[in-house]
Amino acid sequence: MEVFFYGLFMDVNLLRSMGIEIKNLRIAVLAHHKLVIGQKASLLPNKGSSTYGILMQIGEKDLKRLYEQKEVSAYKPQHVVVDSSEEKVNAVCYLISAEQMVGRNSEYAEALWILAKSLDFPEDYLQEIKSQAQSSID
């Protein structure tokens, strides 16, 4: 199954350490969605915005096991179409509702900024992440 990750699950080392088998990794972009970081990350519809992430193939059993964890069990699958290497790909993306996007988690934002920087995402996108962190990121 094709899955689009935009938060800390973009970290393939984290997924592999959890026993998740992943294949066919590639950078992708989801148009008309904006990354929002509260206690966790999610995406909200927003014309003109784009969210960068990692598209990968994960087995349904591994995906179910991943989202059965208490910390992420509120995330629900949504079907999306992402752009990857000049092709459009149907994928699943896990989101929480806007109502659940409360609070602020600067540690999460900083970790996501570091991960996104290591993935060589565009500078303007890195600045969007950085602006959502309470503390400064050097």
Image (cartoon, grey):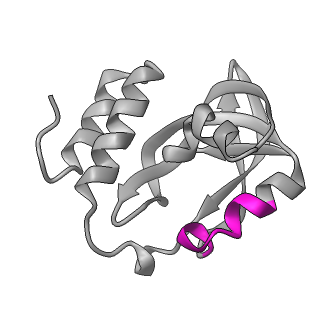
For residue 130, side relative to residue 108 (left or right): left
- Residue positioned most to the left: 136
Most foreground residue, 124 or 6 = 6
| Magenta run includes residue 103 | no
Q: Position of residue 137 (x, y in %)?
A: 17, 35
For residue 85, side relative to residue 43 (left or right): right
Q: Position of residue 105 (x, y in %)?
A: 28, 60
Residue 100 visible in image: yes
Q: Position of residue 128 (x, y in %)?
A: 28, 40
Q: Residue at x 43, y 78 (%)?
A: 100
Tally the numbered discs: 0
Read off the magenta span: 64-73
The secondary structure making up most of the magenta span is helix
The image quarter in which residue 86 lies = top right
Asked if residue 11 is positioned above or below residue 67 in the image, the reply reads: above
Q: Residue at x 25, y 34 (%)?
A: 127
| Magenta run includes residue 68 | yes
For residue 76, side relative to residue 63 (left or right): left
The image quarter in which residue 72 lies = bottom right
Residue 29 visible in image: no
Q: Residue at x 42, y 21 (%)?
A: 118
